[in-house]
Structure formats: structure tokens, C-alpha cells
Amino acid sequence: QDRVSGQRRWPRFQPPELGNSRPQPYGLGSAATREYDEEEDCSRRYGRYQHQGSGQQRQCHFQPPELGPSRPQQERERFEPYGPGSAKREYNDEDGSRHYHHQGPGQQRWCRFQPPELGPSRPRQERFAPYDPGQAKRGYDDEDGTRGRDCLERRKRSRRNNDDGRKHGHEERGQSFSSRDGPVSRSGDRSQSRLRSSLRGRSRSRDRQSDWGRGREEGKSPWGGTNDRGHGRRSWSDSTRRAYPEGNTIVHRSTVPNRNEGRGHGWDRDQGQGHGRGRVGRDIGATSLQRRGPDFRTCQTVSELVNLAHCSLDSMSNRDIAAFWSLLPRLARNRGDRDPNLEEKLGCVIGTTCNRMHSFQCRDLAQASLGIAKTISQVSRGNQQYRADDPRHIMRGLFVKESQCSPIFDRIARSAVGMLNEFEARHLSNLIYSFGLVERNPDIGGETLFNVFGIAAVKILHTFNSQELSNMLWAFVKVDADNSRLFQETGGVISGMDLGSFKPQALSNILWSFAKSGKANPELFGVLGDHIVARRLNDFQPQALSNIAWAFDTAGVSHPVLFKKIGDHVAGLVRLNSFDSQALSNIAWSFATAGDSHPELFKKVGYHVAGLDSLDSFEPQHLSNIAWSFATVGESHPKLFNKIGNHIAGLMSLDSFDPQALSNTAWAFATTGASHPELFKKIGDHVAGLGSLNSFKPQNLSNIAWAFATAGASHPELFMKIGDHVAGLDSLDSFKPQEISNTVWAYATARVFDLGLFEKLVTVAVIKREYFDGQAVANFLWACATVGHTDERLFSALAPLIGSELDKFNEQELANIAWAYSMANVPQDLFNEGYVGALASNEKEFSGEQLSQLHQWQLWQQELVLGIELPGSLQAKCRNAFTSQGYSESTLQNDVVGELKAARLVIDEEVLLGSGYRIDASVKFSDGRIVAVEVDGPSHFIDRRPTGSTILKHRQVARLDRIEVVSVPFWEWNELKNSEMKQHYLRVKLFNGQNCKSSNSME
């Protein structure tokens, strides 16, 4: 098969535009996300990285890939990795805990301090959540669920204040003081109250169980709504009225504004002006008047904990309830003995919590909210299945399946809003973090809860420690709450703090939150980056390192020194066994997208992954991101790609791979030249077998087509599936110019012609031509000419655009454009002295293939007789390159020539004509007529349509060399059974070519 100039062109690889499934680190990523954001485009030459100084802001990144035939400029888009995975958000006391002074009864609580004026810092732009910020021991007196020395001190202060009350005459008058925990008897005879409460304890517990059972039978929530028997909504006040006779005076503390007149003073101004909270302070709670609450320290399982709380419902204070919820998620995995009534008992505790929530103080409310959020987060994580008697199954049923999460947190929100100004930093951070865990941001009075949180947090921002700040910022990102002022002022506060007290996880979570929120602060990133560089990285967990690298890349802030430090640290480790699949994926992705190539790091990661026994622990995104990262930085690692390819090809199905993971994987293998036919077949079969491609974005479709074409992986069903999908779309407005040109280029390179697809893309290209850059224009024209689809609308519409921007086209683009117009034979004013000058200026840059294309363009100018000629030296180079192309004789060609000789015709083989073309054979007749015989094998056709280069050769030989051309298509020849039939076929062709059934297609 002879190789004709312009027939096949091998592209220089450059990754196409990258999309937005950006691998969100943990929780890519996006995610992940890596998704395809419609944000600003940034271009960067593949393989060339320019490092910016520390703290400088870098243009947005990109996600793999979009490649053009002539190594298009890489347009990088923000590419959010899949969201960082679940995190251990533990808040330890050693980490930023503060000492809290409990106010005794009668002491007035003063408003804390005015917010400082914080200097503004610049924000930034975008689909992962790092490890959950740390967990705090949110206490129960001694912060471990026990009553300790702190409780004893309060009792002492209470007795002293009680004596002070009698001195002022309060005790004698029987005056009581408001309690946050609930109703308080005003009789002054507390011993009688205890006795009555004790006698009614079991009765009230039975009532709760009965109500809970009825609510379950009727499908109603036991702590809200009514049932068919006329029972109203149970509240803390209802149960209290049964505990206290009507003769007693009850004081109820409300959180609703304007309901607590004289806050901190006596309950009834008519009975005297009190100046304290009395014996019953908010820290102890009303139920502490009855007896000491349960000691949860002895509980080792959920059943034990729930049983103890259920038996103590009447004696538990608000602090006890908060302690219960704080301990529940810690014991969730400990099943213990099976309790058939566990669901009913836990429901009673939930009901009591909800009914009394309005009376919780700040600390208790935050602690209970965090415990409930952790419980819900733990039991609802993933699709894990539990046994029917597993406490987690029961808790999932109560909180998730019965949709009780939203109502509970709505109650918490209503209780908290009225006293947010009283929250200390730690409690406010815990409260905010709890809502982030369950991703709840309800509307409160016309604005979102997190807007209210933000206002409250800004006032006391300078009192937050590092972990409280990181937990709060993480929660705002988790619920997608936009609060520019909070992030701006938090950045200023952090910049002025002692960074030595920040734990590695707090640093990584803060950076991640700023990057993910789109409020990147270059100054803050510079300060934190410099600080991390000065620290020992041995203290940083793998996930912290990967999240830090991801954050800098996502925020667009370049810090080469930091990346070198992280790269050197990882590359210098003895082994990477502590790095899970996502940490490896995120680090590789971050270095690739940031342009900080670190060969030692990639070699370390590559050999580690290739040496693993199995890749079963790797998610599809991890595999695709690792492969994409190596391809992007140009690191070839055959063992790694073979390992990944074998793993994917061996999977039962690719249903777990999303469109971007599929496209990135295929693109990476094609870009690195890693041959793996089984992998491409697996991906092709999967995509072709899908019912619909609606989940595929334009970039995914163009990248998959490009990858298969570049790798030479033939898969007609895949190209048919993509072509039918694109051609059937109502609109291609979502397709960018590079995606359009890459798609049509892929079909031409893969030798697949889809008339409906080409017509659709040509129509769109004509409309969007103003947005096409030089590479997109050149690739589109080359592709259409290659498949022989010469739509005059396209060539006429793009000519003025090309002429106005000649200085923006490189040598390959100029040669491709000239060849495409030569094949289409659409004369344009474009080709004038200006175009010739542009070609002459690149004379030393043209490759041999490009010089051959320009020779065919010069021949076209001779056809048109326009007098446009290349400079003499360039003309000579072009002809020499064209005529010196090698050729080979195929079996088909030898068979045809043999039959010509057998027919006793005068022939010459491999004849070089004056135009520079070489023909397979020429037949001379007695009348002086010469006919050129072209044996056209499969490479000369696309779906039995002659290629553009074949059409151009036949036309120019006929017009310039003035020789009739007869084509012998391979499929016609293969149908002939014997020599007699073949010779007859040739005589008909040579003597009556116009009647040959293939002649029309050749003209």
C-alpha cells in the first residue's frame, strides 16, 4: 500500500481540556468533584511548567484531557477531585481545650466581648472534604461522662449562694429562680418534691413506654404530632405537670425572645427583686433537685447505655442527656447482649431529648447536637448492611429511615438561635460542626442557619483555637454555605495566630476548606505554606499531606518550595504502606495539575502501586487519577500501566466507573502509548453497551473518541454509539470548540465516517467559528478533508477568520489548512502574498510531512492558474520531500499488475510523474493513450468512500499530468474468482472506464 502525502497524519500528543470531576480528595472530588466546571480556561504547554513564587496565585487547573491532532494547546479547566472521603473528625481535649468557669447560682452572666476589627484578605474560586475535623471531648462535667470535682465545687457555691439568698429574705418568701433545665418548685420544701418525684418515677416511665408503643403502632413519631386517640404532642411541660401537683408553682425557662423578662433575676418582681439564679442554676438543672443522675461510666455497650438512660429518664438533668448522646456514638460498634426493646427504649430517650431541648444551656445543647450528629453520620455512612439486632441498624431505622434527622436538628436550631450570643467558642464550633456532619442548613427567619452562625462566630472569632476554626470552616464548606466575610476575617485571624500550636490536621483542614469554598486567600496560603515548610513532615499523616497539596493546587496558589518538600518527603520514605489509595491518588494528581514535576515522587508511587498484590482497594477514580497524573507529567511507567490495565480489564463490569473515570483512563493510556488492547476493548464494549450516554459530558465523549483514535484501537460500535448520541442531541451549545474539533479529528483519524455527525458538527462550527482558536480551526478542516467531507459552507466561513489571525498559527496548522483547502478545491482569497509570507517565515520549521502537504498545495495553485507560488527554495524542499517518500508493493498490487501482463498489455510499474506523484502502473495503448492504474487497497477508503488524499491524487494527476486515472478498489477485485474474470474486469475498466460502476465515486 503506497503512502500518499496527507493520507495519514500522526498527532503530537497534548492533553485536551480538562474537566471538573477534579479528583476531590477525600469525600475528586471530587471528587471530585473530577467534574467539568464551566469556569475560566487556562492554557499551558504540555510538559512545560512555570513555577510561581510562594504565595502567588496561579491560574485555575485542569482535568484530563482533551487532545488535538497537532498537539493542541492544553486548555486547563478547574477540575475538582471527588470530595475527600470520610474523615475522622475527632476533637481531643489535648488539642486546644479551654478551661470553663461555671457560674454559681445567683451570678449574672455578662456578655463577653466586642468583635475585633479584622483586616480583610482576598478571597478566591471552587466539586472534597478532608478527614473530618477532630473530635472533641465535649464534656459532661468532667468531659468524660462523669460528675467530678467540678460538680462538687458547684454544690459548694450553690450552698453559699443559698445562704446569701436567705440573708436577703428570698428563702423566707419562697421565691424561686428560673432554671434552664426545666420547672422548679416554688414551695421551698424540696424534700417533699423529691418524695413525690420518687413515687411517681416508675409510673411516668411506664407512661413514656406506652406512648412510644402507641406512636410506633400508628406510624407516628412519639415525640411529635398527635395520634388517633387524641393524645396531644408530648412535651417536657406535660410530663412535668404530672410530676408536680397543680398546687405547686412551676417556673419554665424559655428560649424564645421576650419570654424571659428579668433574665438572671428573680422570677416574680412582685415578690421581690432577686439578683441571682438561686439554688437551681442552669448548670445543674431542675432534675438535680431530685437525686443524682446516672453514671454512664460503667456502660460498655449501647444496650447498657440505653437501658441506664431509660431507667433514669426522670432523674436525668440536661447535662446527663447531653452526656448520653456524647457517649452513644463511641459505643455504637459494641453490640452486647440482644435487647428486644432497644428500639422502644431509645425512642423514649429521643423523645425526652426533643421535649426538653428548649431548656438546654449552650454547652449541653452543643454536646447533645454533636453526639446525635455523630451517631447519624456513623450509621448512615455508605451502604453497609447491619443485622436486625445490631444497634446501628436500629439507630439507622430511627434516625434515617423514619426521617427524624431533619425535625431533630430543626428543634436544635430553634433552641440555639435565641442564645447564640451566649455560646463560647468551643461550644459554638461544636454546634456548627454537628450541622455540617448531617449537612443541614435550615432556614431561620428568612435566612439560613449558617448565616446566623457566621454572624455569631465573627463576633468571637479571636477566641477560637485552631481546631475550633478548622471544624467550623469545614462545616460551612460541607453544607455549601457561602459566607465571604467569615472566611475573610478568619484568614486574618489565623495569619496572626501562633501557628506552632496548630496540629497538622487543623492546618490541612483549614487549607482544604478555603480551597473548596472558592474563597482562596493567597496571603494566608503563603503564610501557612511557609510554616509547613519549616516544620517536620514526619508529624503529618498521609491524608494531611495529600489534602495540603490538593488545596494549594485547587486554590491556584503556587508554592514550589512546599511541593518540593512534600515530594522529597514522600519519595524519601522507605515504603508507602501508610498511604491509602486516595492519598496516593490525590498527591499524584496535585503534583500533575500544579505542574510541579517530581520524577522521584512519581517513581516511588509507581513502583509502590505496581508492586501491590491487588488493586481491589482502589476506587475507579483513584486508578484513573493515578494513570492520568503519570500521563500528564510525561512519566512513563510500563509496569504501573500494565498493572492498572490488567486490573480494569479483569473486572466483571465497569458499572462503578463514571464517565470521567473512563475517559481519563483511556486518555492516559493513549497519551503514554501504553498498549493494552484488552483494556480498550473492555472500555469500548462497556460504553457501546450502555442504554444512553446522557451522563457523559462533551469532554468525556471527545476524550474517549480521541483516546481510541490515538491508540489505534478499532471499535466501530463505540464510534457509532457516540456518533448517534451527538447527532441526536437537540443542541450542542454545551460543546466547546476544542471538544468539537477533537471529536471530528478522532473520527477522521479512526477512519470512521458518520455523515449525520459531521453535518451536525459542521453546522455548529460555522455558528461558533469566532470562538475557535488556531488549533481547533486547523484540526476541524484537516478532519473534514481527510474523510472527504468538503462542505463549502465550512471552508468559506473559516477563511476570513484564518486570514485575520495568520500570525497565531504555527507551522503545522498552516500546512494542515493549506492541504485541507487543496483537497476541498474551494478557492479563497485567503491564499495570497500574506499566506505565502507566513509559510516562508516558517520554512526551517516544517517537517517532511508538512513539506509534502505544501507541495500538494502548490500543485493546487497550478490547477487554479492563479500565479501564487512559494519561494524557490521552499518549493524545492517541498518537491524533494514529496517525491522521496517511500513506497511498498502490496499483494493486491502485484496481483493486479500480474493480470495486466497476462492480458498482454504494455505496462510500466511504479511510474514517477511530472507532478511528483507516483502511480502503481501505467498502460500504453497503440494510439498513444496512457492510462494510470491505481490499485486502491483498504487504506484508500473509509467505509468504501475514497479518502481525501485519494481524491486529491486522482484529481491532480488527471489535471496536471493529463493522464486518465483508473482505480481498482480492493473489494471489487476480491469478488473476482479467476484470472479470466479479472482480465475481463481490467479490459472493461481500461477501455470503457466511464461505464465502470466505481468511476463516479472517483471523480
Image: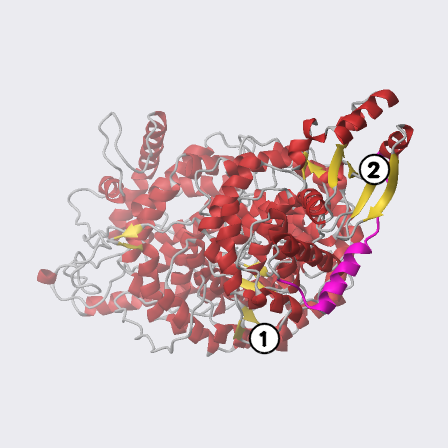
Considering every residue shown, the one lying at the far left of the view is: 270
Looking at the image, which is closer to me, 335 or 455? 455
Residue 72 position, x and y percent, is: 62, 58
Residue 970 in which image quadrant: top right
Residue 128 as seen in the image, left or right of residue 2: left
- Callout 2: helix, strand or loop? strand
Which residue is found at the position 45% from the left and 69% from the top? Answer: 98
What span is in magenta?
Answer: 868-892
Task: Point out the image quarter for the C terminus.
Answer: top right
Near-viewer residue (334 or 173): 334
Q: Nearer the viewer, mark 1 or mark 2?
A: 2
Contact (Cβ within 8 Å) of mark 1 with mark 2: no
Colour basis: secondary structure
Q: Residues within 10 Å of mark 1 (few under 14, many from 20)?
A: some
Question: Is 643 on the left-hand or right-hand side of 1002?
Answer: right
Q: Is residue 333 visible?
A: yes
> What whole-number distance in Å separates the C-alpha atoms at marks 1 and 2?
67 Å
Look at mark 2 in the image and give the residue it sits on.
923
Image quadrant where residue 812 sits: bottom right
Q: Amino acid at mark 2?
A: Val
Q: Secondary structure at mark 1?
A: loop
State the residue lying farthest toward the front.
927
Disc 1 target residue: 52
- Residue 766 in the image: state x and y as whole percent: 47, 49
Q: Residues within 10 Å of mark 2 (few under 14, many from 20)?
A: some
Residue 453 magenta-drawn?
no
Q: Position of residue 160 (x, y in %)?
A: 30, 68
Checking the image for residue 651, the label placed there is none
Q: Is residue 980 above or below residue 547?
A: above
